[in-house]
Image: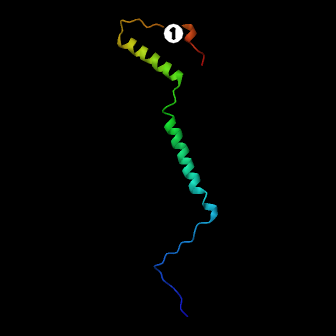
């Protein structure tokens, strides 16, 4: 009657199939978030470009107080 009671052997049962979907799904999620974050830098919003241009004009007008500040034309005003 010999029984193998070797305490140094660490037997780990394989994972059930129900848990195998978690790792690829996590990696796909990380990849999707990374792609969205990386591509957001290259998206150019025309309204933002126009706002930055107007802010630069206003900053130059503030820095040079002798220059008259022109109000925007009525066709440039857009309702919010």
**Residue found at x 48% / y 78%:** 9
Identify the secondary structure beneath mark 1: loop
Q: Quadrant of residue 58?
A: top left
55 up-or-down from 7: above or below: above
* Residue located 64% across and 62% down the image: 18
Residue 54 in the image, given as x and y percentages of width and height: 46, 16
Picture coordinates of residue 73, whole percent (x, y):
53, 7
At x 50%, y 18%, the residue is 50
Count of numbered circles on the image: 1
Colour treatment of the image: rainbow
Vertical position of residue 16 compared to residue 44: above or below: below
Residue 8: percent from left, percent from top: 45, 79
Judge by depth and name the residue closer to the eye, 77 or 37. Answer: 37
Residue 56 x, y percent position in the rendering: 42, 17
* Other-residue count near label 1 (Cα within 10 Å), few / some / many at <14 / 14–19 / ≥20: few
- Residue under label 1: 72
> Which quarter shows the C terminus?
top right
- Which residue sits at x=57%, y=71%? 13
């Amino acid at each position: 009657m010999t029984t193998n009671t070797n305490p140094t052997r660490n037997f780990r049962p394989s994972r059930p199939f129900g848990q195998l979907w978690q790792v690829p799904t996590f990696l796909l999620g990380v990849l999707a978030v990374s792609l969205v974050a990386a591509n957001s830098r290259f998206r150019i919003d025309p309204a933002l470009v126009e706002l930055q241009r107007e802010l630069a004009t206003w900053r130059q007008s503030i820095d040079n107080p002798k220059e008259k500040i022109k109000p925007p034309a009525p066709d440039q005003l857009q309702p919010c």
